[in-house]
Every structure is written in structure tokens, then in C-alpha cells.
Image (spheres, helix red, strand yellow):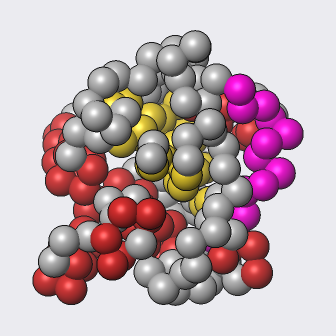
Amino acid sequence: MVDSQMGKASWNCSLRNLFGEVMFAAVGARGHDDWRQDALDAMQLRTGDPRGWLRLIKAPGGRDYGTAPESPFVAVTPADFDSVFPVSRRGAEQIMVTLLGEWFQVEGIPEFSVREAELTSHARVILERFGGDALFFTNAATARENPHADMFRREGAYEGFTGHVLDCGVIALSATEVGIFWGFTID
């Protein structure tokens, strides 16, 4: 039980330190043969965190994202996952960090050069939950050509999932859980 409590405490700490209170970060259980349905269930908040750990579902401006029709993912279908691309674990960590920046670029993160190691460490803690065999996907178009690219230095092209001006994120997939970590630009 101690390991579970330590894992929960580390998760909560890293989630809050990396994303503050404005983020969509939700985890759901795997229950379908097609992982895309599990991801959709987590996106649309039809499932709770199987471990009961913290989730953040705050929109820019601080209001809660709810279930349909308030969910940013209300119109997403399993076919939309055709526009996500495999990305390396390191790339997934980097993308999660860039969600803090304006237009999801490191140049938009205050004091990034000083904070890079700390922020990356928080992303690593979050993704460790999914284990060493986890798969990661993103809608950052750079991963389409090179899943091992430096995602801190990527171009700002994304395959949008929502009606927001811009959205970007990471899907983390293990044999038992799926995590959705997404950021949005509303203007």
C-alpha cells in the first residue's frame, strides 16, 4: 500500500506542478479491444480514474470542463484517432512540457531554460504510471515523420481534435490504462 500511496502523491504533485489548474488530464481503464474507444471514454469523461487519482479538467479561464456538451472532445469519434501519431517516451515528455507554453512552444514558457529539467521530471513522473511498455501518441504533426524528433524544437502544426483554435496533447497507453493529457488555445 505504501508504494501505491507514494505513487499517488508523486502523481498529484507532478500533475499540479506541471499543469497548475488549467489542463485536461484524465485517465481511464482499458476495457475494449480497440484502445481508441478507451481513449474516447477518458476524453469524454465516461470513466473515472481506475486508481482514484487526481485528474485535472479545467478549461482556459479556470472553468471546469464537464461531460457533453461542455466537453472539448464532445464531437470526437474513434476515426479521429487516425490523425494521431506514435511518439517516443522522450517526445511525449517534451510535448507535455510544451503544453505550458503559448501556442505549445517552449519559447512561450517563462524561464524555460532554468525550468526545463524540473518540468521534464514532472512529465516523466506522470508518464511512469503507464509502465515501461507504454505506447504514446500525439497530434503534433512533427511526430508523423519522426516519432523520435526533438519535440521541444518542433514546428507548430497539429491535427486538431476540438473546436478550439488550437489543441495539442499526448495519449499514453498501457495494457490496463489510457491517459489523456491535452492543452487548448482558445484565442
When the figure is inspected, residue 115 is found, relative to residue 82, above or below; the finding is below
Q: Going 47% across and 35% down the picture, which residue do you hit?
A: 27
Q: Going 45% across and 47% down the picture, which residue do you hit?
A: 187
Quarter holding residue 72: top right
Residue 108 seen from this side: yes
Q: Position of residue 77 (x, y in %)?
A: 78, 31
Judged left or right of residue 33, residue 147 is left
Quarter holding residue 158: bottom right
Q: Position of residue 98 (x, y in %)?
A: 39, 67
* Number of numbered tags placed on the structure image: 0
> Which contiguous range is marked in magenta?
75-87
When the figure is inspected, residue 33 is found, relative to residue 13, above or below; the finding is above
Judged left or right of residue 83, residue 39 is left
Q: Is residue 57 magenta?
A: no
Q: Position of residue 31 (x, y in %)?
A: 68, 27
Q: Is residue 80 magenta?
A: yes
Q: Going 70% across and 56% down the picture, which residue do you hit?
A: 159
Judged left or right of residue 185, residue 74 is right
Give the quarter of the figure containing the N terminus. Answer: top left
Q: Going 51% across and 18% down the picture, which residue do you hit?
A: 70
Judged left or right of residue 152, residue 3 is left
In this orientation, which residue lies closer to the viewer: 67 or 184? 184
Q: Position of residue 144 (x, y in %)?
A: 75, 73
Residue 181 seen from this side: no
